[in-house]
Amino acid sequence: MCIFCKIINKEIPSSIIYEDADVLAILDLAQTTLGHTLVMPKKHYANILEIPDDELAHLMSVVKMLAKRISDKLGAKGFNLLVNTNEVAGQTVMHLHVHIIPRYDENDTIKIEFTENKLDLNEIANKINEL
Ligand code: 5GP
Ligand code: ZN
């Protein structure tokens, strides 16, 4: 059984901030920024490609509600939502989860940078749109 399934089964303790029949939200041990939260389906899906759309819709509505509640209660000015998918993208726990990472100011303890590459956008779009 995966570590998040053990948390969902209450075999491993966690700081729960939301729970319903299908979804659990806990504070991430790492607390990358204050209030860093993980929202997960109770059913084990390895990643976002496995969960049925209706269950994903409910999961994301909980994410939206909690992102606002966490921001309001902790005084965050914004937040990043992150779903790491597969090892190459930094996924370490193979049970779907959405990170809510509250943001406070430019000195907060996370840095997300987008680098620019000079690539042919038409060529890429054609490849993605190919039947
Ligand atoms: P990933 O890298 O898979 O997107 O994120 C996994 C996250 O789970 C990490 O941010 C890590 O800190 C968190 N994590 C791993 N094990 C536990 C645990 O036992 N309890 C809690 N609350 N968080 C955990
Ligand atoms: Zn699991």
Image (cartoon, grey):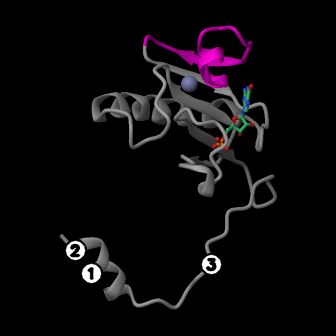
Q: Which residue is mark 3?
A: 115
Q: Amino acid at mark 3?
A: Thr
95 or 25: nearer the viewer: 95
The reply to whether the C-beta atoms of the residues labelled 2 and 1 are less than 8 Å apart is yes
> Nearest the camera: 9 or 34?
9
Ligand 1 quadrant in view? top right
Q: Position of residue 52 (x, y in %)?
A: 31, 32
Residue located farthest toward the front when viewing the structure as drawn: 1
3 drawn magenta: yes
The magenta stretch spans which residues?
1-21
Which of the labelled discs sits on residue 130, or is there none? 2
Q: Secondary structure at mark 1?
A: helix
Tell me what residue is drawn at x 37 percent, y 34 percent. Answer: 51
Q: Which of the two discs, 2 and 3, sits closer to the camera?
A: 2
Q: Residues within 10 Å of mark 3 (few under 14, many from 20)?
A: few
Check residue 22 in the rendering and tell me which mark sits there, or answer none: none
Image coordinates for residue 39, horizontal then vertical, percent: 55, 30
The answer to whether residue 98 is above or below residue 17 is: below
